Structure formats: structure tokens, C-alpha cells
Image (cartoon, rainbow, N blue to C red):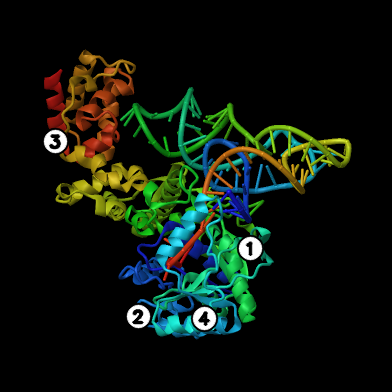
Amino acid sequence: MVKTRFAPSPTGSLHIGGLRTALYAYLYARHNNGSFILRIEDTDQNREVEGATKHIIQILQHFGLQHDEGPTLTESEKGPNGPYVQSKRTDLYRKYAQQLLDNGHAYRCFCTKERLEEMREHQTKNKLAPMYDRRCLDLPQSELEQKLKDNIPFVIRQKIPYQEIKFHDIIRGTTRFHGKTIDDQILMKSDNFPTYHLANVVDDHFMEITHVTRAEEWISSTPKHLFLYQAFGWEPPEYAHLPLLLNEDRSKLSKRQGDVAVESYIEKGYSVESILNFIVFMGWHPGAGEEREIFTLKELEEAFTLEKVHKSGAIFNLEKLDWFNWKWKKENHHKKLLEIAKQIDPNVTISSPRKEQHIFTFQDPQLENSFNQMRGNEILKHCEGFLSPKHKDNSDKLTNALITVEEKILRSPNEVTDYIDFYFTLPQYPKELLTHEKMGVDSNQALDSLKACLEALENCPWTLEEITKALMNKIQEINVKNGQLLWPLRSALSGLQFSPGAFEIAFVLGKEETINRIQQAITKL
RNA sequence: GGGGCCAUCGUCUAGUGGUUAGGACAUCAGGUUUUCAUCCUGGAAACAGGGGUUCAAUUCCCCUUGGCCCUACCA
């Protein structure tokens, strides 16, 4: 059975690259009806961040990447091969470190950090590879015993065999290394905690991991791990080294050059689906003949194979994420509106002048009202967190206002305040805004048009339909082009260069405020 | 310095020993729309370079170049 694992260290919020690594491991396990394990690698006590483990579990859960074995939110664990937190397994690592010592595959090293530093400095200066010089490899028995008796701190180093080693990687094929180029790795630190290399091998073995999926940066450590498997006489797992996620300048994706915390993308309003789709395609593609652009998690589970993962890194470019997010939200929003409309009025007529845009015509204006109310609530869900308090007071007005900027909110919910503020406060604007040369609106025309609007709206019942009808009739009556009347009206009502259409704005503002704004504009001209 | 990995439009990518090298995002132009957006149509845009192998190479091999990763008592 296939068994994969995600093994993060709890050093802070989950990195977006880490999420992708987890996703690939999860998908591969599910694709093969295997299991997916979460293991916490907290062997560096200095870097551990309080609450990070919980945070990681929550994020994985948020994305639906349920693990079959590992720690849980209730601080218990599930699975037969626990504990799944390395700091609780230290006895195991000590036992196997001792075994390595006994078999001559490892040795104690008493060198101080200062000496190691000096040695490295010297090597670098002489253009040599910085590597441990094995001074402590063959310490005479008496000296060794004396140092132990004196309680001199030591580490345990792996004795790397000076021989060639090759291994197969599912993504990259065969790679060769020579032992002579590999440093004698520290396996146990002087605080008696293991390093990644030892803990990782021991755990993967006892947790029966069949496929190790991890980032490319681990390739050069793989021979060390393989030598360890050799020393223990264990069967190594299959490896798949994943391509890196890159900064704009092609270096490894880092905090310094942008946001890498998964959490912050969730906070910014990116949906689970869009994040998942975005990251899964940075480094993988199902191959020829695949035309779907957006996958559900289930569909990904079916489609995913490690063989189709790419070799080269991918630049983490947010433009596409924005597109995924918007596309997904839009589709879902319109699906939902369709549902709601049919629920409210089974006889509703729906026309679709454009792709994924619908015009709903209800039998009864009363039904239309309740539909609009629900529609507004739907939009509100997308932007609630970004709404400024001063817009929250008038709920009817808010609902209608939101509907007029629906698409824009789906695209960037965080800008909702900018989109709707003009409904609540008329911006200061120059009188030039009311004119438009290309459309044939000079200030005389603007004045005439606005006065005509006043006439048209004076006795107009205040529904969107009636407002539209009244103004369009007026346009015919005074014989101007649409834009000649509608441009000055729209700009008078919004005070903005760009805004929703004049009819909708008038409807949202209400009769009194509409007339008021038109009159204000007239005094400017 | 040593070791390793990688290389198709700006970005994510499809693809093949013979293709007009395909798609998406971004971008540009035109159209629809009272403005912006949306929507529709169209355009520009890539096989890093040099050698082989071959009738034929973007595809296979080698070299060069470039980028990246590792080179910690971090993972």
C-alpha cells in the first residue's frame, strides 16, 4: 500500500510551498488508495513556535487535506505508528544512534563549534570544500573514555562511506553522488536531539512510508539518507523530489520577496479551490488532451500522478491566482443566484445576454424585492470583512448598492469601500466631469440634459424599470444621443469618472437624493 | 571552491524525430455597452547557444552558457 507523508517543522505559519508539498503527497496517496500521514518534525527546539502544529493542522483541514495518521487538533493522535511528533520519539533515535555507533557507521565528535568554524574558514580560504576533517573519527579508546568521563559535550556524526551511490527519483530519473564529496553529517546534536537526517530516516522506516515527496532542495541530502538505510539494513522508500516555487528573480520563494504564509492568502479572501488549483498547476499538469481549467479536489485525486510532476521550478506569480479566484467565485455566485431565483419564483424568466450573466424577471415585484435582498446578502458574504462601518447602517441601500458592483466585488472584495462610497457621500468633483467632448456633451448640453432628467424623474415611480423607461423616453423626446443625456446624469449622480450605470445609481440613491444631486450639478454649470 | 538539479511566449504550461510549436493568465487592438468593468473577435509573443546522430532535431547525445539548490549542532 502506498503511504506518503507531509513532515513540516512547526516553526511558524505554513509556507505556501509547504502546502503544495502536502497537496502532492495527499493527492498521490488518495490516487493510489493509500494513506497520508502528518508528522511534526520539531527536533530543533530553538526554532519551534508555540501553536504552530495546531495551525498547520487547521490549514490542512481548511483545504480538505485530511490525514489518516498523525496528531489531531484535540492533541491526541491517530494511527498505529505514533507518536507522530518527533520530540516524543527521542528514545527511538537514541537507540538507533547507538546502534550506528556500535556498528561503526557513526562516531562521536568532541570538536567545539569554534574549531569547526576555524576549520571551515581555513578550507574556504584555500578553495577547498568545507567539510569535517574527521579528527575525532579514530580517537584512541583511552582518550574517548577520558572525554566521556569529563563530560565533554559531543555530537554523533555519520561516517559516510567513500563510495559511489546512485538512486532513482520518480521525477528526475537516476542521480549519482560520491561519498567523498559528502560531509560526515551530524546525526545527534549535543543536546541529545537528533537532526533531520536521522529522525527522518528512522521515522520513515517505522511509519512504513513508501513514497517520500519533498522539495528539490533535499536532493543533495538523499545520499546521506540512503547510506543510513544501508547501515541499518532497511529498505529505502521511493523518492520524488518536487520542483521549487520561485520568486520573481528565480530564487527559492522566500518571505523577503512577498507573502508566503498560506494564512495570509486565506485572509485576503482567496477561496480554497482557487488556491488549490493555482498551486497544483505550478509543477504539475495532467498532460495532453486535458482541457479542464479548474479541478475539484476529488478530480485532482483522480488525475494526479507523480510521473507528471515537472522537473523545473515555477515562478510564483499571483496574476493567475487572481484569475482563478475570480473565475471560481463568479461561477459559483451565478450558480447560487440561479438557485435562489428559482426557489423564490419557479416561474422566473431568465435570460442570459452574456456568458455567466443572467437577467431575472419575476412575476411579482414583491418577489423581485426578496430576490434582491438575498442577492445582496450573497455578495455581502464575499466582502463583509472589508466593509467600512459607515456603510453598514442602511441595509436596504447597501444591498442595492452592492448589486450594482457585483462583478467588481467578486474580483476584488477588499476594494468594496471604494466601489460603493459614492452612494453614501457624493465626491467633490470639477464641473468638467459633467461634460464629455467625444460624446458631444459641452456644458450647455449638460445643463439641458440635466434639466430634462429632472422633468423626466419628477413624477416617476421609483423602480429600476420605471426610471429606465422615463429617461429613455426623455432621450427620444428631446432627440439626443443616449450618451448626451446619460453621461452628465451618471457623472452628476456618482461624482466619478467610472461608476455603475445612471439608472441603477438613481434607483439606489432614491428619488430625493437623485434630484438633489442633479440640482447640485446644475448649480455648477 | 565542491557536489547536484534544471532550461518551450513576460508567467503557468501542452507537445512531437517531420506541427502554421497549441492553450491559459497578463498585454495590445477592434467591437458591444451611457463611462469603467464584463462579454465577443483578433494581434503580438517562445523551443538559451554551439556541436554531433539523422534524409530530417525544439524533441536524442555531448559541450558551453545561464539560473537555482545544497555545502549549519536548521529543516
User: Marks 1 and 2, Cα distance to the nearest angstrom?
Assistant: 44 Å
User: Marks 1 and 4, Cα distance to the nearest angstrom?
Assistant: 22 Å
Q: Are marks 3 and 4 in contact (CB under 8 Å)?
A: no
Residue type at mark 2 is Glu
Q: Are marks 1 and 4 in contact (CB under 8 Å)?
A: no
> Which numbered disc flags the more N-terminal residue, 1 or 2?
2
Residue A75, disc: 2
The mark closer to the camera, 3 or 2, is 2
User: Marks 3 and 4, Cα distance to the nearest angstrom?
Assistant: 80 Å
Q: Residue A298 at what x, y percent from top left?
A: 53, 65
> Which numbered disc flags the more N-terminal residue, 1 or 3?
1
User: Marks 3 and 2, Cα distance to the nearest angstrom?
Assistant: 58 Å
Residue under pointer 4? A97
**Residue beneath the point at 67% across and 65% down:** A167
User: Marks 1 and 3, Cα distance to the nearest angstrom?
Assistant: 82 Å
The mark closer to the camera, 1 or 4, is 1
Query: Taking B13 as reference, is A72 above or below it?
Result: below
Q: Nearer the viewer, residue A21 or A490?
A: A21
Residue under pointer 1? A180
Residue under pointer 3? A513
Q: Nearer the viewer, residue A195 or A521?
A: A195
Residue type at mark 4 is Ala
Q: Chain of mark 3?
A: A
Q: Are marks 3 and 2 in contact (CB under 8 Å)?
A: no
Task: Locate the C terminus of chain A and report the quarter of the image it occupies.
Answer: top left
Query: Taking B53 as reference, is A279 above or below it?
Result: below
Residue type at mark 3 is Glu
Dot 2, how many residues are within 10 Å of its Cα: few (below 14), some (14-19), or many (20+)? few
Residues at marks 4 and 2, common chain?
yes
The mark closer to the camera, 1 or 2, is 1
